[in-house]
Amino acid sequence: MTQTLQTSTLAAQRQTARPGNALPEIITVTSGKGGVGKTNLAVNLGILLQQRKQRVLLMDADLHLGKLDIILGASPQYTLAHLVDGSRSMDEIIMHHPSGIDVLPATSGELNLLEADKQIMRVLADSFASIQHRYDYLIVDTAAGISSTVLTMALGADKVILVITPEPASISDVYAMAKVIRNKAPDLPLILLPNRVKSLDDGLELHKKLNLITQKFLQTNLYYGGSVVEDGAVRQSVVRQRPFVIEFPKCQAAQNLQLVCHRLLKLHPQEIDRRSNIFDRLRVNRKIVEAL
Ligand SMILES: Nc1ncnc2c1ncn2[C@@H]1O[C@H](COP(=O)(O)OP(=O)(O)OP(=O)(O)O)[C@@H](O)[C@H]1O
Ligand SMILES: [Mg+2]
């Protein structure tokens, strides 16, 4: 009974259009370096936002869908490629995860968004327009590296989360990413999220250190998003294929991420332009990226 009630409430929530013309806030999670925790943080942050009554769509913009399978314990059946070939609708592609968040498997071997022609981008933008009002947040999980796809997703966001770990390679990759983004988007808020740190003080220190460098060389301030400590519960949850905020809600990492979520909800660094939808933004941004 409870289950049925919950399911129908959720379904009703999903069908409800947002008041006015507000579109979801787009947050892209990226890092430059691979394996620093982007997917884990994107998924778990999405779930925490959902637990705070925000409607969340997680867009998987990483070609390696396998990772999301592992973390969510569920694999998407279809991707945007099925929408483009006309075999599935947007509603059929979106996967409803039991945690309450929805997942949009955006990239696949058969469809490269950056090579998609005008007509395909129009189909994507129109289909997305029919569902976007159902969400408060669109969280985009990117692949590692500074490829043109990653950059396009970052430039299309309202806020970018830069995940960093204390390793030197991660620090230099995040700096490189901040530099490229700043070059093209002077006002896009960049939020540093130190992950796998020994203590919250270490995370703060990492932010302070990098922020001094970006202020000096890029004339850019990095917002501090909060830190997540190294926690065995995260590794264990990956093995169990259950998001750590659900499997171990009291673990250190989950508590830390609650604070990150709180900060994120409070952070309004700029008036956000919510008039255009993600695929329109991708179309514009890929031209900018191509010109790099
Ligand atoms: N806070 C943490 N504490 C302990 N382990 C962590 C933490 N964050 C991430 N990990 C470990 O790092 C691994 C990689 O995480 P994840 O797949 O989220 O990284 P990613 O940045 O998305 O990687 P990729 O660049 O390959 O997409 C996880 O499987 C987990 O074992
Ligand atoms: Mg990943």
Image (spheres, rainbow, N blue to C red):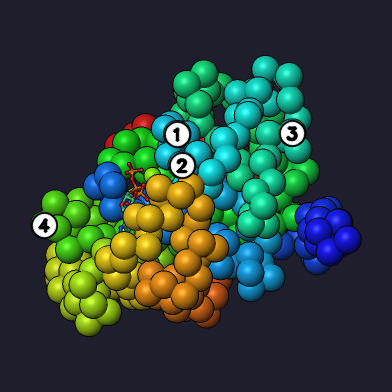
Q: Secondary structure at mark 2?
A: helix
Residue 194's place in the image compared with 202, above or below, is above
**Crowd band around label 4 with a 10 angstrom C-alpha radius: few (<14), some (14–19), many (20+):** few
Question: Ligand 1 closer than 8 Å to the CB at disc 2?
Answer: yes
Q: Secondary structure at mark 4?
A: helix
Q: Which residue is mark 1?
A: 66
**Crowd band around label 2 with a 10 angstrom C-alpha radius: few (<14), some (14–19), many (20+):** some
Task: Classify residue 291 as left or right of residue 43.
Answer: left
Label 3 or label 2, whichever comes before in sequence order: 2
Nearest the eye: 187 or 64: 64
Residue 265: give x, y in percent of width and height.
Answer: 54, 75
Q: Which residue is mark 3?
A: 92
Query: Which amino acid does the dot numbered 2 rest on?
Result: Ile
Query: Which amino acid does the dot numbered 1 rest on?
Result: Gly
Query: Which amino acid does the dot numbered 4 rest on?
Result: Pro
Q: CA distance from mark 3 to mark 4?
A: 43 Å
Q: Residue at x 19, y 54 (%)?
A: 170
Label 3 or label 4, whichever comes before in sequence order: 3
Q: Residue at x 47, y 34 (%)?
A: 65
Q: Secondary structure at mark 1?
A: helix
**Residue 288 seen in the figure:** no
Q: CA distance from mark 4 to mark 1?
A: 27 Å
Tag 1 and tag 2, C-beta contact below 8 Å: yes
